[in-house]
Amino acid sequence: MPKTKPIRLDGQLCFQVYSANKKFNHFYQQALKPFDLTYPQYIAMLTLWQYAPLSVKQLGEYLHLDSGTLTPLLKRLESHGWITRSRSESDERTVVIELTDDAKKKRDDVFERVNNCFDVLGLTPEEKEACSQTMSTIEQKLDLYNETQI
Amino acid sequence: MPKTKPIRLDGQLCFQVYSANKKFNHFYQQALKPFDLTYPQYIAMLTLWQYAPLSVKQLGEYLHLDSGTLTPLLKRLESHGWITRSRSESDERTVVIELTDDAKKKRDDVFERVNNCFDVLGLTPEEKEACSQTMSTIEQKLDLYNETQI
DNA sequence: ATCAAATTAATTGTTCACAATTAAATTGAC
DNA sequence: GTCAATTTAATTGTGAACAATTAATTTGAT
C-alpha cells in the first residue's frame, strides 16, 4: 500500500535551494563581519556604490524591495555611518540616499575582503558560470510564472 | 583614475542568488496559499511527512535550524492543526512532534498542488538536473569554507 | 484654482533566521 | 548517591521580507 510515494525531485530541489541559500547567507555574513555589514546591507551598498545618489524608490527598484524593508535597513546603515538620508528639496515625498565619505573610502576594502573570501571558496570559472547560468534560467522561469499568476 | 573598478562577477553572483531565492520563496508562497502553509512550514512538513515522529532536535538536524526558529514555527503548525507537540515520557526534555490525521490526509493534496505548480514552471529535466547539480556544488564548497572558518 | 487620483515613505503586524541566554531534565564522574 | 557537566527547548533580542495601511506631497483633470 504505497500511501507514502517517494518525494519527487521538485521537493528535493526546493530543499536544496532553501538550504544552499542559507549557507550562502552565512558565507557573506562571515565575510562581512569586519565591516559590521549584513548580507542584505551589503547588497544595498553594492547598488549605492554604483548608482548613488538614489531615492528609496529607485533603490527598491534595483533590489525588488519596498519601503517596508528598506526604511529600517537604511536607518541602520545611516546609524552606522554608511549613508545619509534626506528629503529631496524638489519633491518632499522622496528621500535621497547618499554615501558618506567614509563609505566611499571603505568601498575597495570591502570589495577586497569579499573577493578574497570568494576566492577561498575555490569555485572554478566554469562553476561560477554554471551557477550564474542556472540562476538566470530559474529567475526567468519564475518571472514568467509569477506574471501568469497575477 | 579608476576609483570605480567594475564590480566583479562574485558581486553579480551574490545578487543573482539573493534575487533568485526571493523569487523562489514567492513561487512557493503562492503555490502553498490554498493550504495556509508558508515555504519554511512546507519544508518542515516535508520532513515530518517522511520521518515523523521526530523530536525538535532531530527535525532541527534535518533542517539545520535551532529551537529559536523551530519552536515558534511548530507552535504555528500546531495551532493550524498540522501537528501535535508533546513532552516525551522517557525524557522530559525532548518535545515530540507528530502529524495529525488531518495532516496525513492532506499530504497527497499538497504534493499534487506543488507538483502542478512546479510543472507549470516548465523546467526541463535537464534544467532541473543542472539546477540540482549547481546547488550541490555550491553547498559543498560552502560547507568546506565554513569548516575552515571555525 | 480646486480637488480627486497618484506617488512616495513610513508604519504596523506577521513570519522567519540566528545568536545568546535561561530553565529544566538527564548523565556521568567521583 | 551527589553534584557538576551536558543536553534539550524555550526565551529574548536583532535583522530581514512582505502585506496592508497611513500620511504627506504632487499631479492632473476639470
Image: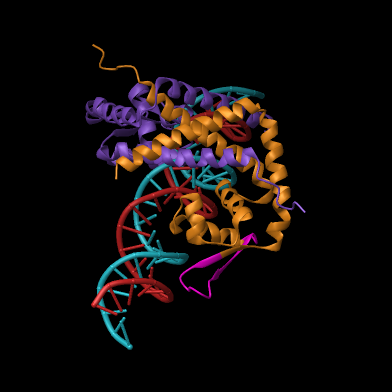
Chain colours: A orange, B purple, C cyan, D red
Residue A55, x across and y down, in percent: 52, 63
Q: Is residue A93 in the magenta section? A: yes
Image vertical order of residue B47 relative to residue B66, above or below: above
- On the picture, is B1 further left or further right than B122? right
The residue at the far top in this view is A1
Image vertical order of residue A82 relative to residue B105, above or below: below
Q: Residue at x 49, y 23 (%)?
A: B130
Is B30 in front, or is B15?
B15
Q: Is residue B64 visible?
A: no
Q: Residue at x 51, y 35 (%)?
A: A21
Q: Residue at x 59, y 58 (%)?
A: A77
- On the picture, is A148 further left or further right than B132? left
Is B136 in front, or is A141?
A141
Q: Residue at x 67, y 46 (%)?
A: B6
Is B130 in front, or is B30?
B130
Please identify the quadrant where the N terminus of chain B is shown.
bottom right
Q: Is residue A137 in the magenta section? A: no
Residue B128, x across and y down, in percent: 43, 24
Image vertical order of residue B50 relative to residue A60, above or below: above
The magenta stretch is A80-96
Residue A129, x across and y down, in percent: 59, 29
Please identify the quadrant where the C terminus of chain B is shown.
top right
